[in-house]
Amino acid sequence: MFDIDIDLIKKYDTPGPRYTSYPTAPHFNESFTHKDYLKEIKNTNRGRNLPDLSLYFHLPFCDTLCYFCGCNMIVTKNRERIKRYIDDVKREINQITTHLSGDRKVVQLHWGGGTPTHLNPEEIIDLNLYIHDRFEFNPVVEAGCEIDPRELTKEHLEALRSGGFNRISMGVQDINESVQKAVNRIQPEALTRQVVHWVRELGFDSINLDLMYGLPFQSAKNFERTVDAIIDIDPDRIALFNFAYVPWMKKHQKAIRPEDLPAPEEKLDIFKMATQKLTQAGYVFIGMDHFAKPDDELALALNEKKLYRNFQGYSTHAGADLYAMGITSISQFGRIYAQNIKKEKPYRAALDQGILPTAKGCYLSDDDLLRRHVIIKLMCDFELDFVSIEDKFNIDFEAYFGLGLSRLNEMMADDLLFIENRTLKITHMGRLLIRNIAMKFDGYLERKEDYARYSRTV
């Protein structure tokens, strides 16, 4: 456990990117088309010793609308609509695999949404078999799926486990009934415990539970019961997300009344209480929102400086090329990001034309590649060796990042970081404000070219 200076948290609690990518998604543009994406696929599938593959599938459908949700999701009970979407994803798989080198192996698979388990067990088995038939899988693969316990049967989990899935991530948010009612997500604690029991009974390697602070009617006092219950349930990983109240982006969040949200001071007290209780219970603070048991792969990767960060959050597969399929999904490899079309009908229309359903993306400049590397190192290693950056990118670090380094002086005075022997090291307190530190190395912010509206950093 470490002390948290709430005054420093208040001081640096400003809007900022989460850096699941750099450049961040607002910098993707429509001049990047399906032709650019296809060209880069072909360019990165030549030669030998190619990187491993990471696959992401966006399955957007949900049974009900959670008012806090910031995901790209679709509420529907139309089973024909879901079936047709699965067929579309299969067509996109075919378009991708046509151009992949045959000896590349999948080391990571993730289904996200939405709610992937809004598919029925038969649909889960069918899609998973199709994926495994079209891609070559490494014998050792990290295969995870997000689930919603409210519409889940044990058969759903059996379908996932029999198909090779070994990791489960499940939203809880808060066990307090008044909070659940306010965000339209009724999920009794007994149900959460039942599903966790099934997951363990079926032999999944790891389970992650998501919590969220800053929701209506939360307080440090009533959220403490939720944290205690989660510690008792004993998941391998815990994500403690800051509720991003962005009604200008997510219109359904207008169903949440601003006056019902905890005051900024109360929200920070919730964050402090939860973070201290989780670390006191033995969980390792991985970075930003994530906690893991000391023997978990994420914690081990943190100690060994092998963590990576992408659109799926923290990962242990730094060298893999990410191919993402389904609406809104974002692929990342080589020098590009490519995001798919966000709506079903135009997504389907692109597939009907035999083209990749790319909506926008970007090519990374040399400066982008350098700054992305620096930001990832900061967010994953919590330190930065200037010499290694110089050797990798052939620059003078202090000259190149002079402005950013000068803007760290106040943070150094506040004991968030220090520099010795040309290595920047982040303190325990600084880890809680890692987004703020990373922002000092963001070229778009430095050049005042970033006009996006972000959620707050804490």
Image (spheres, rainbow, N blue to C red):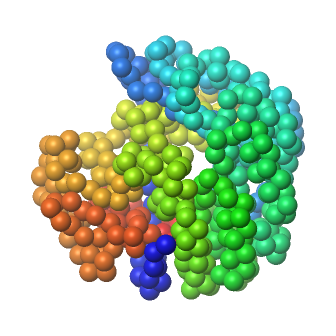
- State left or right for residue 382 relative to residue 400: right
Percent position of residue 213, x then y:
64, 71
Q: In this rendering, would 168 be left or right of 297?
A: right
Query: Relative to residue 1, is residue 143 depicted above or below?
Result: above
* Residue 7 appearing in the image: yes
Placement of 27 over or under 182, stated as above or below: above
Q: Nearer the viewer, residue 193 or 387?
A: 193
Residue found at x 37% / y 48%: 304
The residue depicted at 21 percent of the width and 60 percent of the height is 423
x, y (%) of residue 323? 52, 32
Residue 383, image quadrant: bottom left
Please determine whether, in this image, residue 267 is positioned above or below residue 93.
below
Q: Is residue 49 found left or right of 361 in the rendered image?
A: left
**Residue 248 x, y percent position in the rendering:** 62, 65
Is residue 21 something one can see in this rendering?
Answer: no
Q: Is residue 12 above or below residue 307?
A: below
- For this view, does 214 lie left or right of residue 257? left
Q: How many marks?
A: 0
Q: Nearer the viewer, residue 397 or 37?
A: 397
Q: Nearer the viewer, residue 344 or 166?
A: 166
What residue appears at the point 39 percent right and 52 percent down from the top-left corner?
303
Residue drawn at x 35%, y 59% as measured from the top left: 382
Q: Using the rendered view, name the quadrant where residue 56 is placed.
A: top right
Residue 107 pos. (x, y %): 52, 30
